[in-house]
Amino acid sequence: MSFEGKEILLTGGAGGLGALIAAELLAEGARVTVIDRALPDRCSDYWRHDLSTLDGLDAAAAAVAQRRWDVLINLAGVLHFGPVERQSGAQTISGYMVNLIAPVRLAQAALPLMKAAGAGHIVNVGSVFGSINFAHFATYSSAKAGLRGFSQALRRELAGGGIDVTYVAPRAVRTALNTPTVLEFARLTGMVMDPPDRIAAKIVTAIRQRKAEAYLGFPESAFVRLNALLPGVVDRALFANDRKAARLFAT
């Protein structure tokens, strides 16, 4: 698929990964509208909305519904790392809002005009953590698991109508989303963090090829399949690293 002249809506386009995706799409001739709380470095249009609140999300969805989009890219995300009981109620709600509810609501808003045109593309950027549900990333992992399920169900619902649904699942990416504690966990466990420019390019490629699903990174992509078939094996494989993570929160 060529991006020349395409109307693309990108959430989270002011972040480290989002800015790179926006730049690549713009370089290929797309018009990129960014939804974010912060002003992006590069875009064709900028809409300031807070996707972590019901009012902010409703306002964003109302704006999205007014225009026909060739591609909607749900990239915006927030991350909590730590024991689930230490996450505040407000953090829990805003996390599910941004990571799961917002992609669903914005897809709902964009779909009527896509269906009227008989063409469109919904892209949901999840995480390998949505298929390999990591300890101490409980709400993030479960939200991304929900996003993966929504993407699969929506793809089946829209089959044959000219609208594609892509679910892209990177492994850990070295961006500002990662707190110092996450970086320490990565150091202790040897968790690989990919450079954002490489992942941005792979996400754009998955969109261009209109892939149904793309899992980025090995061996994590193989673990996705293993976890679906033999989760007990993955439990045992992750146990030592889970205990290392627990020690980070011992006090």
Image: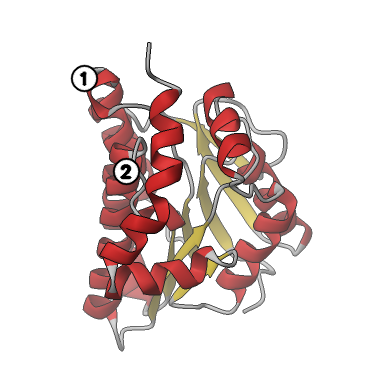
Is 169 positioned to the left or the right of 188 in the image? left
Question: Which label sits on residue 89?
Answer: 1
Residue drawn 27% across the image and 52% down it:
104
Element assignment for label 2: helix
Q: Quadrant of the C terminus?
A: top left
Question: Which label sits on residue 102?
Answer: 2
Element assignment for label 1: helix
For the residues labelled 1 and 2, the Cα–Cα distance comes to 18 Å
Along the line of sight, which residue is nearer the eye, 143 or 204? 143
Q: Position of residue 178 (x, y in %)?
A: 56, 31
Q: Position of residue 21 (x, y in %)?
A: 66, 52
Is 239 positioned to the left or the right of 93 in the image? right
Near mark 2 (Cα within 10 A), the count class, few <14, some 14-19 or many ≥20, is many
* Relative height, residue 119 to residue 201 (above, below): below
* Relative height, residue 4 to residue 106 (above, below): below
Near mark 1 (Cα within 10 A), the count class, few <14, some 14-19 or many ≥20, is few
Q: Nearer the viewer, mark 1 or mark 2?
A: 1
